């Protein structure tokens, strides 16, 4: 029936007023925390940077195989099996054994019995497989193993990228997975894209290693270049300390030398290791290596047991700040490459906003004029409901501090059209009922009741499409589907609660009039 209790009227009015105030918080600043929220503008509306990063997993695979090689060597040593030509190449670990031992190794490594092969569980957990190729035994990751490794690297990289960006203070970054080896980064409003590219492009793999005078180091050695010049040093491959042992890193001014340095603090294990290494290495150079380049190589003058130290290297305050940020956020599991980059200027974003608002206003005015001419006073009620519907939609987006994009504005415009469509269905149905029913109250009630099925069918179908787009689509499509989905709920609420309430109030005062619509 066309009846609203006082309690229902109160709740409809309260909900409408609440979201109108929430919407106004985008323009007016309130002291209240709830009413002090704003819609965030997406990359296409306020400008910013778009980066598509690809993870290079080759070094990770080789490092994993390198770690596994120790276990395999130990296994052969225990079995008294002599191996030759042991090497890692092209993401494979290969070695040669005599013909007599070859089949035995294949059988044992493929056996699930722990008493035959104690390394089986580790072998299986890494999704590794061993095969024979031209008298050479080859250990490599299975297809499933590669997928799991790439997924793990992607998850770690995603978290570290998020930490680095959060440290910079970028508002509302959008960081998403793409496939199993790519990461999309959208940074609305970013005014220094070169800095963020530099930060994301560095792996930040920090190690402390001794400088040696020759290539006879028992752990092996390699020649590395200094970051700030072309000089080279022979550095031991033995890692004294890694970035995993860092608790904190901050830029500082060294009061004695008046240069900018990065001071660091180690965890308990790192402090113990560092103290032991510096006590035995007095007089030696300790190379501080970042991503394969030597930052500095100071001479150890005394034991450092405090668990803290400094990294110097001719830094500016900005470069020291960035290095400290990289060390605090942790090393990426694998190098990242920028394979796609776009920058949207704020002027272009403002043009998009102006075009979207212009389209919304023109469409809204045309709809208002059409409805008013067609349905007179009920057209006025519909127009008022449309305005409240927009306040509800924008209010919900504001409450959750959603990010509005240009496709999102398109979703809002479509919502206006769907709200009008629902009202047109109702009023046309009421006209049909008035032909046979002279009682205005009954005719209007039947009009709302009998049009409900068609309206719900249309909106539920659209809602299903919006849900599919949201879960299957990417960034811009998600923005469109989100505003469209929320708009469907606000439309149904405004049509069956707000518009119906206003219609009832008018009908009750004019129930004996003819030609109401």
Image (cartoon, rainbow, N blue to C red):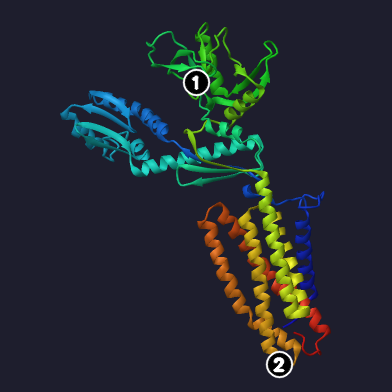
Q: Position of residue 255 (x, y in %)?
A: 70, 13
- Relative depth, front residue between 100 and 338: 338
What residue appears at the point 43 percent right and 40 percent down from the top-left corner? 150
Q: Quadrant of residue 309?
A: top right
Q: Is residue 355 left or right of residue 295?
A: right
Quadrant for the N terminus in the image: bottom right
Disc on res. 150: none
Work out how far the residue at label 2 is from the one at label 1, CA to CA, in angstroms: 88 Å
Residue position for label 1: 293
| Circle 1 SS class | strand
Q: On the image, numbered disc 2 is attached to which residue? A: 437
Other-residue count near label 1 (Cα within 10 Å), few / some / many at <14 / 14–19 / ≥20: some
Taking the spot 34% from the left edge, 39% from the top edge, the residue there is: 124
Residue 11's quadrant in the figure?
bottom right
Where does the image place residue 81, in percent across and percent down from the top left? 22, 25
Is residue 157 positioned above or below 220 on the image?
below
Residue lying furthest left? 100
């Amino acid at each position: 029936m066309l009846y609203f209790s006082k309690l229902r009227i109160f709740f409809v009015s309260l909900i409408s007023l609440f979201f109108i105030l929430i919407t106004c918080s985008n323009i007016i600043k309130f002291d209240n925390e709830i009413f002090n929220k704003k819609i965030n503008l997406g990359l296409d509306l306020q400008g910013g940077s778009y980066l598509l990063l690809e993870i290079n997993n080759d070094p990770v695979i080789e490092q994993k195989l390198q770690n596994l090689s120790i276990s395999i060597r130990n296994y052969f040593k225990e079995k008294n099996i002599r191996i030759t030509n042991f090497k890692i190449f092209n993401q494979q670990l290969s070695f040669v054994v005599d013909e007599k031992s070859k089949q035995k190794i294949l059988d044992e490594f493929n056996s699930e019995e722990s008493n035959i092969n104690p390394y089986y569980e580790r072998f299986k957990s890494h999704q590794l497989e061993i095969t024979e190729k031209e008298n050479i035994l080859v250990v490599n990751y299975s297809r499933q193993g590669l997928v799991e490794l790439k997924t793990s690297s992607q998850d770690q990289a995603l978290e570290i990228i998020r930490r680095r960006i959060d440290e910079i203070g970028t508002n509302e970054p959008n960081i998403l997975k793409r496939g199993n080896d790519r990461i999309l980064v959208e940074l609305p409003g970013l005014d220094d894209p070169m800095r963020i590219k530099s930060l994301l492009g560095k792996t930040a793999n920090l190690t402390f290693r001794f400088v040696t005078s020759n290539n006879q180091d028992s752990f092996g050695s390699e020649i590395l270049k200094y970051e700030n010049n072309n000089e080279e040093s022979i550095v031991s491959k033995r890692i004294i300390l890694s970035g995993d042992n860092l608790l904190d890193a901050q830029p500082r001014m060294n009061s004695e030398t008046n240069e900018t340095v990065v001071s660091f603090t180690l965890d308990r294990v790192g402090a113990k290791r560092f103290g032991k290494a510096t006590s035995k290495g007095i007089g030696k150079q300790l190379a501080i290596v970042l991503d394969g380049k030597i930052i500095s190589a100071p001479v150890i003058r005394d034991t450092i047991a405090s668990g803290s130290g400094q990294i110097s290297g001719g830094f500016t305050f900005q470069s020291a700040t960035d290095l400290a940020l990289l060390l605090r956020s942790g090393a990426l599991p694998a190098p990242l490459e920028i394979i796609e980059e776009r920058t949207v200027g704020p002027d272009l974003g403002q043009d998009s906003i102006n075009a979207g608002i212009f389209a919304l206003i023109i469409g809204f005015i045309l709809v208002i004029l059409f409805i008013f001419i067609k349905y007179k006073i009920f057209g006025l009620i519909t127009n008022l409901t449309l305005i409240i519907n927009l306040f509800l939609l924008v209010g919900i987006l504001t409450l959750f501090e959603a990010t509005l994009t240009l496709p999102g504005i398109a979703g809002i415009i479509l919502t206006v059209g769907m709200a009008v469509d629902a009202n047109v269905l109702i009023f046309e149905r009421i006209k049909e009922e008035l032909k046979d029913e002279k009682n205005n109250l009954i005719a209007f009630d039947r009009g709302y009741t009998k049009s409900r099925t068609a309206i719900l069918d249309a909106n539920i179908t659209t809602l299903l499409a919006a849900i599919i787009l949201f879960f299957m689509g990417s960034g811009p499509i998600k923005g469109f589907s989100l505003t469209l989905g929320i708009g469907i709920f606000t439309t149904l609420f405004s049509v069956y609660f707000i518009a119906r309430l206003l219609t009832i109030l008018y009908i009750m005062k004019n129930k004996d009039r003819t030609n109401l619509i």
